[in-house]
Amino acid sequence: MDPASTSKSEQPDSHTRRYDRQLRLWAASGQQALELSRVLVISGSATSTSILKNLVLPGIGQFTILDSARVTPQDAGNNFFLHRDSIGKSRAEESVRFLLELNDSVKGTADTSDLASILDERPQYLKSFTLVIAHNLRELTLKKLSSILWGDISGPPLIVVRSAGFLAEFSIQFHEHTIMDSHTDDIPSYRLDNAFPALAKHALDLDFDALDVTDHAHIPYFVILVRALHDWKQAHGGKAPEYKQLKDFKAQILRMKKKEDEENFDEAITQVFKAYQKTTVPSEIRALFSNPSCVNLDESSSPFFVMLHALDLFTRKEPYTLPLSPKLPDIKSDTVNYIHLQGLYKAQANAEKAEFTRILEEVVAKAGVAPVPSSVIDEFVRNCHQLKILKGKQWDQDDNSALLEAIATNPAQVGTHLALSALFAFEAAHKRWPLPGSEADLAVAQEWIDAKLSAAGWNEESVVQDDGTQVDEAATGPQSLTFREHVSNAMGEIIRAPTADLPTTAALLGGFIAQEAIKLITRQYVPINGVCVIDLISSTTGTIKI
Amino acid sequence: MSQIPTANADWPERYYHLDQILDRPGPRTDEAFPAGDQVKEFLREGCKILVIGAGGLGCEILANLALSGFKDIHVIDMDTIDISNLNRQFLFRPKDVGKPKATVAAAFVMDRVPGVKVTPYYGKIQDKDDDYYMQFNLVICGLDSIEARRWMNATLVGMADPDVPETIKPLIDGGTEGFKGQARVIIPGLSSCYECSLDMLNKQTAFPICTIANTPRQPEHCIEWASVLEWPRIKGDLKLDTDDPDHISWLYGVASARAQEFKIEGVTWSLTQGVVKNIIPAIASTNAIIAASCCTEALKIATTSAPYLDNYFMLIGTEGVYSFTFQHERKPDYLIVEEFLDWLLEKQDIQAKKPSLSYGNTPIYLQAPPQLEQATRKNLQRKVSEIVPAGNEITVTSVSLPFSLTLKVEYV
């Protein structure tokens, strides 16, 4: 056999080769979601094009830049996707042209319409997008945009980005975000405490004593634990070991050794919790079952909730667990024993997936929704121990008690958030931006913050923290500063550079927002839920829930 | 020869955004900040910066520096462009595949950002000597190789003379993996350096050879068998080139056959390539964050417009945005003698008052008599590791100790 000639056809095509380094993160399913997405970015600022660069490169389907402005000499100085020769031309058209050079398979549109008239006359324009991103949009327009998008429950999520000089923040407006593959490190249960029949039979039929020393040292620890638990129960009136009996249980396992250096038995000791921890439906997953979208299905229900509903039904029957995961970790063993064990798990997992699919078909028929493709069922079942639902809120609906709590835990982040809010409130009130370095404008902005804080019920005394409050030291930096000092530092910094879209800050935001956009579009990994505040003077970030 | 562009290439309002932070200080800016023309002149005419690596981070770093007003940028990279670079290394196009990264990146940046001079070097960092590195004010590393980082770090630490400030070249280092990354600032000889944090690296998975040879269980075991054992056995002296798709195909075929024999599932071409090349997933967005973070620090160091990172920024973007900014501490091998003495005085169980230190017959620091104290005082600021090789002993003598104490020194 010449292996090289038989496998030539297996070499990846150019699409796979181009995207190899990212397919190893979000796989073909994530890539497909990206390639079907349509992203609207409002304004052709340096930050906006930096965000788009990081979405065009991994291959989103289509993007639109909505911007009626012409390129100024200032724009040509801080934006890598404009050139000196672009000055005077349409900013949307010029930046789309430069961005499209990055990836032939992406489509881009420059829309020079006026956003205000779109919002007034044809808001349905927004509905055609998967995601809307807005950078440094004026307060009143942003309010209108966010409320239109919030008003349509099936409309796209909105990422709001604000920045000035070294300071920035962003948040995502969505009603609810469901995640099938959250890529957390949570490990599914292998059900060693309650072995499925084929596994139990294998462990009990195996004659440990008859094995020679080599084979004995190759018994996978899964099998050792199932057997040890069985033997314990026999000797203890059918009861599993309690926590305080753990020492005795471990001693029993060690007595099963034939030789001192059998590593498989040592592995069984370190993994002993898998045998006595009762397999149940994890509380985080059980909590999802009471979500109204899961309880009340109708023909508009998404596949996620239809499957979640079926999962709830699945767990109400014997053995009252999630479907078994087919994927085993590596275990000290030899090939034959390991592959046999893997076979037992695959067979059981397939049987349970078939049962889940049967339940799902009934649910689908009853709800009147479209059948779920089997590849999606596979992904759902494989990841069912780490499903997530994020509950979002409308942009700019700050809740006062949450604000006070955030001041106690993340004073630096709240300071920056208030200073950025004051900047945009200033523009809304005065129809102009503050002047760089202006003491008068600083005083006006500071007054706005004071009013906001007193409306929220904050006063100097509330600085004293309750004992239960945890200060997030990693995010706040030097603890010697009071909240007042954080606010005045941030406000001073904003007035220093109120209209500066620094190339480095823009590039950093470009990375952060694109990461979040990819998480939203692929429904993999977990996006932020709150306001992520960035301070490039202290080189810190922190997410506040307000 | 000297074609460093002058302000003539600029146009009015070009630096409208940057000038807002350069024309006046902010509340946290150091008092010595020379706001206005002085700082702009240094940044745009006087500052010379070196970028190591023109790959995922390097492309981003070069573009950021050029837009930030650095006009004399040098870049070193020994690699050529591969198609798998194009999902993130945004200065390269399909037509550039096979060309040197440094050269293509430099030309692109100079074309897009008028008046910036980017000088490429297509080769190894080890080709250059101390004189070459001495010409720069700052060095930024965007590398994926630990070895290259260690070399660069050691070179800059070796060049640093605490008495001659110009010899201290701040090193800014970035690295990414998937949605995670880190950026750090190293002030050679003064702060924690790359060697101090080697223990923070993830160890590469190594499979025991007996598993590979006798008891394979995972597809990776079959792939290792093909590359580590079968390739040399069958191909003899032919060196395995992990960039050659035909070589990967051969390994894939051999690994697949072995997997089939042992009924192991999951050997694919992509996994084969990933295992033998030790591929680390990489995306544009994470590179953008880390490169921007490095360049923000470069801008802050070059202009003193804001305090720079002291000294480590770590990012995890998989669940929300989690970052941690902290001061990574120097490892004891960079203890200076004075710090070692302080440590000794704090040790209750040693109870040494006014201890004197020596290494064999060589005095390190003597408390008395005054002439010898004065003669050895300069050693207080030297690194312990410069004086005492690892595994050797420092002798401590003290009036409060009835005997002389020897301490064995190990550097971890």
Image (cartoon, coloured by chain):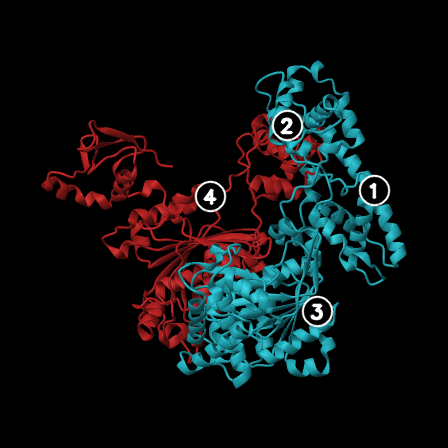
**Which of the two marks, 1 or 3, is nearer to us in this view?**
1
Tell which chain the image draws in cyan.
Answer: A
Gap in angstroms between the C-alphas marked 2 and 3: 59 Å
Chain B: colour as depicted: red
Gap in angstroms between the C-alphas marked 2 and 1: 31 Å
**Which of the two marks, 2 or 1, is nearer to us in this view?**
2
Q: Residue at horizontal 61%, vertical 31%?
A: B225
Per the image, the residue denoted by label 1 is A317
Chain containing the residue with disc 3: A
Label whose residue precedes the other's in the sequence (2 or 1): 2
Per the image, the residue denoted by label 4 is B200
**Which of the two marks, 4 or 2, is nearer to us in this view?**
2
Instruction: Mark 3 vs mark 4: tell me if same chain.
Output: no
Picture coordinates of residue B151 (x, y %)? 38, 45
Label whose residue precedes the other's in the sequence (2 or 3): 3
Per the image, the residue denoted by label 2 is A245
Q: Which of B328 and A290 is in front in this view?
A: A290
Instruction: Mark 4 vs mark 2: tell me if same chain.
Output: no
- The correct choice, above or below, for A80 with respect to B411 in the image is below
Quadrant of the image occupied by residue B95: bottom right
**Which of the two marks, 4 or 1, is nearer to us in this view?**
1
Per the image, the residue denoted by label 3 is A129
